[in-house]
Every structure is written in C-alpha cells, then in structure tokens.
Amino acid sequence: MNIVLGITGSIAAYKACTLIRLFVKAGHEVQVVITPAGKEFITPLTLSTLSRHAVVSEFFDRRDGSWHSHVDLGLWADAMVIAPATAATIGKMAHGVADNMLLTTYMSMKAPVFVAPAMDLDMYRHPATQANLRTLQEYGNIIIEPGEGELASALVGKGRMEEPENIFTQVMAALSAADSPVATVTDASASGKKLLITAGPTYERLDPVRFIGNYSTGKMGFAIAEAAARAGYEVELVAGPVSLPTPEVLGAAIHRTDVESAAEMHAAAMRLWPECSAAILCAAVADFTPAHCADEKIKREATGEWRLDLVPTQDIARCLGETKRDDQRLVGFALETTAELHNATDKMQRKHLDMIVMNSLRDAGAGFGHDTNKVTFLFPDGRQEEFPLKSKKEVANDIISRLCEIS
C-alpha cells in the first residue's frame, strides 16, 4: 500500500517518526511531504532515512526545470495521512488555499485522507477550527480526534495529537473496512438511530465511605460509544463511576448519564430503552448489593466481627431482554473465568440477547484495565466469530459493525 504522510509545523512532528516506522514495518511504502514550517521541527534527513524515500517539500528541487508533481502523488497514493495537522493547514485545506506542496498534494488526492489535528486546547476548540474540521468531514476526510493531555503550552486539555500507534490502527482499520462489505453498512443502517450503551463498574455502598465494586475502568464501553457515534448512532451512554471523559466525535451526539449503583444503572437503562433501537450492555454491574447501608462510617473498634448480608441486584440484561420489541436488538457481554463458551451461551439464551461478546480473564491482555481485548462473538443460531487480541478501539468497531449487520 502506498501512503503519503503529510507533516506540518507542529511540535508533534516528532511523532511522525514512529508512524513512519509502523507503516514501513507493516510492508507499506511511505512518501513524506512536509511543509516548510514542518522542517523547523524535524529534519528531512531523519524522515528520508526512516521512509527510505527522499522527502518532498518544495515544488522545485533544482534550477534545471525538474519539479515534484502533486498530481502524480495523488494518483500514486492509496491513502494520505496528515499528522500532525496544524490549525493553519486545516483552515487552508477547508478553504482550498494551495500555497505549498502538501496542500496541492491534498487537493490532488484521489485516495482517502486522514487528518490528525495537533494544537493548543483553545485553538482546537475555537469555533473557526471546529467549523473547518466539520467542512473537511463533509468533503469526506476522516478526522482522527486528538487526545487530552499536557500540551506544548504546559496547559492540559484536548488538542494533543493522537498517539502514532492509534493513528496507525485507525488508518489500517478504515482501509481494511473499505475493502469489506461491512464498511458501508454502518453509515446506512445506523444513521439517526438511538443506541443505549452501559459502561464501567457499579459501586454498592456499605457506609458513607466504603463500597463493594470491581476493577472495570469503562474503557471498552467508552470505545464502543465513540465507534457508535462515528457510525451515525445517537448514543445514550450510561456510565458507572469512571474517570474517563465523554468521547467527542464531530457532528455526533453522545448523551451521558452518570450513575453509581446497580439500582441507578437499572433505572436509567429502563428509562432510555423504549426509545432506543438497540442496546450494548458493557458495564460490569454488581450481582449483589448490601442489604443495608449504614448511615455513619462503620468503626472496626465498635463493630468487631462484621457479617455482611447481600441481596441480588436487578438483572438489567434480563429486564431489557424481557421487554425487547421485535425492532430492537440487544447485545451483552460475558466476562468468564471457566467454561467460557457454555456460560456465555447460557447467558445469551436466558436473557434473550441477539449477540454476546465473550472474553476470558485467562487470556493475557483481555479484561479489566487493559487497552486491548480478546473476544469471541456468539449468536443465537450457534455461529461463533473469534478474534485475536486487538485494541479496544478495534474491538469496538467490530462490535458496531456486527450490530449493524443484525439490525
């Protein structure tokens, strides 16, 4: 695969080195096109060494009439990735200002274009930048959302270019999907529909300062919410106590409801379910809750030996499954430790699920706390689809694709 990597004048330009190595290691040809400002942050010698191709920056290299053809690059490439993309370059792309080699190459590009913004938080959230990004999306460009973190200004916020590993993953997933019949099903079948997603743990209070909980971080559920929004769903995200920010997807709606206990999550899910076309129940909901919650902190010295009485919580999946209409779809999760297939299949049947995502704590890199997951999809007709270890963002895309297929 031939990839044009565009680099602009940002401190994040150093990350392009890792991105080039990832593409080259995967067997792809990389041609770097860099703006004059970009060369102030990273040298063409470094980039040409890693890409094994001379870096293109100016229209003319010599005074003998030879020149770089942006048209030829647009025809050669299978994809163009602009990472980092500054606010200035994004604005020029949106308004057709072709005043350097990178911009003329972009405007001649026949292949998909991926844009990874990098800038300070105020620049990123400025209405002009947001309008320009929406314009690029309308043109068909794929925006790779920046992350949150410490920026070059020493401020903390959104605007930090996505990490090279995640850019590589998103580009490869999108290009692979483009060759698959699943690629277009998401936009067509998801647009305008409302999807309920539960994510994270629940905390069951023992007293004002203690609770029963689990190790769920909410990463999988939040990745699904982001993938669903990108596919065109209006997302209703019911989140247990997690520290994750609500995913931001340009032009998409993610409505978040924060809850703490299983009872609160049950109430929110039941309230939202009738207006949704589907639900993905990713939350690690407590099966039991204390029969009584103390009004004051329980003291060890005054209490001595303490016996805890637990009662079952409401089964959210079963309640939604029992009220599911013919036009609704319900997807559950099964995190197992033994007899995985048997237990997951039994859960799917008992709770009237249309699909269940099974994973096992015995698989390295799967389960709570990881950025990766290893899952198997099970269906009521007996079909099974097993996947290798992937990033949770990739798993989320797989789940949304299958949901669109069965909807």
Image: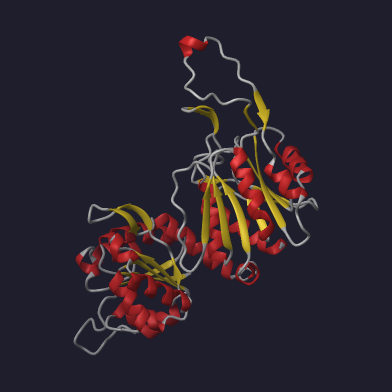
Residue at 45 percent across and 65 percent down: it is: 28
Q: How many marks?
A: 0
Q: Nearer the viewer, residue 53 or 7?
A: 7
Q: Is residue 60 left or right of residue 353?
A: left
Q: Where is 71 relative to 250, above or below?
A: below
Residue 245 lies, in percent from the top left, at: 43, 51
Identify the residue at the far right of this view.
381
Residue at 76 percent across and 43 percent down: it is: 345
Q: Where is 295 relative to 69, above or below?
A: above
Q: Is the image coloured rainbow, by chain, by secondary structure, or in one colour?
A: secondary structure
Q: Is residue 357 left or right of residue 112?
A: right
Quarter containing the C terminus: bottom right
Residue at 54 percent across and 62 percent down: it is: 229
Q: Is residue 242 visible?
A: yes
Q: Is residue 32 visible?
A: no
Q: Is residue 25 left or right of residue 306?
A: left
Residue 94 lies, in percent from the top left, at: 37, 79
Residue 349 lies, in percent from the top left, at: 79, 45
Q: Nearer the viewer, residue 135 or 66?
A: 135
Q: Where is 127 relative to 284, above or below?
A: below
Residue 257 lies, in percent from the top left, at: 53, 50
Residue 3, quarter of picture? bottom left
Q: Nearer the viewer, residue 63 or 353?
A: 353
Identify the residue at the far bottom of this view.
65
